[in-house]
């Protein structure tokens, strides 16, 4: 079984090792394959948190 680091390829919607697609097409690195599998959800969660912080800062 391959070892990490792991990446999520946004071009192919697949988890890859360091030998995968070019860096511009991927998110990561992630320590575990499972973290990479949930990369898009992690990004969405962080974006939502930052948006809420921005709104609080701006007084909305």
Image: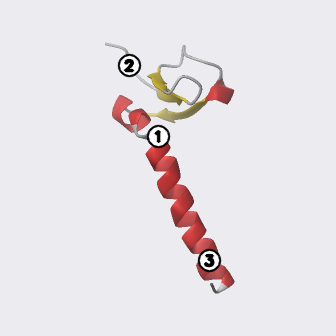
Q: Decide: marks 2, 3 in contact (CB < 8 A)?
A: no
Q: CA distance from mark 1 to mark 3?
A: 24 Å
Name which quarter of the figure residue 15 lies in.
top left
Q: Which mark is residue 58?
A: none
**Observer-nearest residue: 22 or 41?**
41
- Rate crowding at label 1 as few (under 14), some (14 to 19) or many (20 or more) other CA atoms within 10 Å: many
Q: Which mark is residue 3?
A: 2
- Rate crowding at label 3 as few (under 14), some (14 to 19) or many (20 or more) other CA atoms within 10 Å: few
Q: Which mark is residue 55?
A: 3
Regarding mark 3 in the picture, which secondary structure is present there?
helix
**Residue sitting at 50 percent across and 27 percent down?**
13
Q: Position of residue 26 (x, y in %)?
A: 59, 30
**Residue sitting at 58 percent across and 73 percent down?**
53
Regarding mark 1 in the picture, which secondary structure is present there?
helix
Marked residue nearer the N-terminal end (1 or 3): 1
Marked residue nearer the N-terminal end (2 or 3): 2
Regarding mark 2 in the picture, which secondary structure is present there?
loop
Q: Residue furthest left?
A: 1
**Observer-nearest residue: 29 or 50?**
50
Camera-side mark, 2 or 1: 1
Residue carrying label 1:
39
Q: CA distance from mark 2 to mark 1?
A: 17 Å
Q: Position of residue 48 (x, y in %)?
A: 53, 62
Q: Position of residue 32 (x, y in %)?
A: 37, 32
Q: Position of residue 39 (x, y in %)?
A: 46, 40
């Amino acid at each position: 079984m391959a070892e990490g680091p792991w990446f999520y390829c946004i071009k192919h919607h697949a988890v890859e090792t360091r030998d995968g697609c070019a860096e511009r097409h991927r998110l990561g690195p992630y320590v575990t394959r499972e973290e990479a599998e949930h990369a898009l959800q992690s990004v969405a969660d962080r974006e939502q948190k930052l948006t809420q912080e921005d709104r609080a800062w701006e007084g909305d």
